[in-house]
Image (cartoon, rainbow, N blue to C red):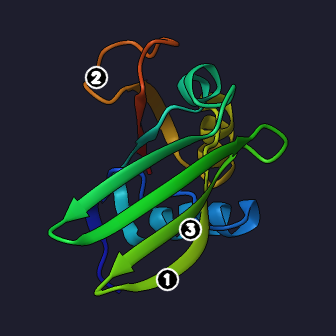
Amino acid sequence: MERFDAAINWFTSFGYHDDETCKAIIAEYRRALKPGGRLLIETLHHDWIVRNLAPTASASVARSGDDLMVDENVFDPLTSRINTVRTVIRDGEVRQSRHFVRLPTATEFRRWLIDAGFVDVTITASDGQPLTLARRRLMVVAQR
């Protein structure tokens, strides 16, 4: 079986599943890495979202010509999920879908990675600086 030196999960590509599936994905990353290999996960910082998004719902709009995409976001503190209703208007047709992103806290990320067998778990802001409540994105680096 071929193994890898590194695996990268970038720009909030993690968290679209229930907790058990997210933990299984982390375990699969570990399995796919060579001994000493590293996993990098870059995503939204849970605590920044709680401070900045949680008090109210938010929406974002993207336009391309006459087409629109509207994302309505609400953070659920009981599940640590951003729940999104996405409305797309293209060629006069309206489609709607729903999805969520689970945002583990830094402590949860560390526990999930260590439970999966990773070592040397480092959590910083996405630019490598210390993680603070003012930083919107975080980066986790863990070694197999």
Q: Earlier in the sequence, mark 2 or mark 3?
A: 3
Tell me the CA gap for discs 1 and 2: 39 Å
Mark 3 surroundings: few (<14), some (14-19) or many (≥20) residues within 10 A:
some
Amino acid carrying label 2: it is: Gly
Which residue in the structure is indicated by mark 3?
A: 25
Image quarter where the N terminus lies is bottom left
Q: Secondary structure at mark 1?
A: strand
Q: Is residue 4 left or right of residue 74?
A: left
- Pick out the residue farthest to the left: 65
Question: Which numbered disc flags the more N-terminal residue, 3 or 1?
Answer: 3
Q: Nearer the viewer, residue 99 or 58?
A: 58
User: What residue is shown with label 2?
Assistant: 128
- Residue 95 circle label: 1
Determine the image quadrant of residue 124.
top left
Q: Does residue 71 appear left or right of residue 141 in this picture?
A: right
The nearer-to-camera label among 3 and 1 is: 1
Q: Closer to us: mark 1 or mark 2?
A: 1
* Residue 98 point in image, percent of width and height: 61, 71
For the point 60% across and 67% down, which residue is it?
A: 99
> Is any part of residue 37 visible from this angle?
no
Residue at 54%, 23% in the rendered image: 48
Q: At which x and y percent is residue 19? A: 73, 59
Q: In the depicted view, which residue is nearer to us: 59 or 141? A: 59
Q: Is residue 39 above or below residue 5?
A: above
Identity, as a three-letter code, of the amino acid under mark 3: Ile
- Give me the C-alpha separation between circle 3 and circle 1: 30 Å
Q: Position of residue 30 (x, y in %)?
A: 48, 62
- In what element is the residue under mark 2? loop
Asked if residue 58 shows in the view, the reply is yes
Q: x, y percentage for residue 35?
A: 37, 57
- Callout 1 crowding tier (Cα within 10 Å): few <14, some 14–19, many ≥20: few
Q: Residue sitting at 79 percent across and 48 percent down? A: 79
